[in-house]
Image: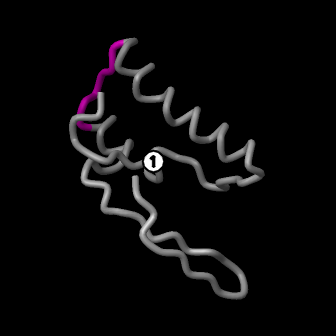
Amino acid sequence: MKLLDVFEDSESFYLVMELMKGGELFDVVIEKEHFDEDEARNTITPIIDAIKYCHDQSFIHRDIKPENLLFTHKNFA
């Protein structure tokens, strides 16, 4: 994932990133209906790693949910 630009105003920072063509985790879960253990692990591990990295850098995301987790491409697992 590539960071393209950053903007800020008096209250927030805005990060402009590349288009995530894989869509939302929520839509993938609804479409797939079932994940086997390996697919679930391969899907959630990088998400948890990214959240841990952000927390280690003193950043938080206050709205983590499947609709806010995006895939770079359709073949995610």
Locate residue 55 relative to residue 21 in the image: left or right: right
Locate residue 23 relative to residue 51 in the image: left or right: left
Q: Please state the horizontal and vertical placement of residue 66, each as a whole percent of the image.
A: 46, 44
Q: How is the image coloured?
A: one colour
Q: Main secondary structure of the magenta part?
A: loop
Q: Label 1 is placed on what type of residue?
A: Leu
Q: Nearer the viewer, residue 34 or 56?
A: 56
Locate residue 17 relative to residue 62 in the image: left or right: left
**Residue 13 falls within the magenta-colored stretch:** no
The residue at which mark 1 appears reads as 69
Q: Residue at x 25, y 45 (%)?
A: 73
Q: Please state the horizontal and vertical placement of residue 15, each as a whole percent of the image.
A: 52, 69
Instruction: Find residue 49 and report its image quarter.
Output: top right
Q: Report the residue that reaches farthest toward the top.
A: 37
Q: Which residues are magenta?
A: 31-36
Q: Please state the horizontal and vertical placement of residue 7, each as a whole percent of the image.
A: 56, 81
Secondary structure at badge 1 equals loop
Q: Residue at x 66, y 77 (%)?
A: 12
Q: Report the residue that reaches farthest toward the bottom.
A: 10
Q: Nearer the viewer, residue 36 or 75?
A: 75
Q: Nearer the viewer, residue 60 or 67?
A: 60
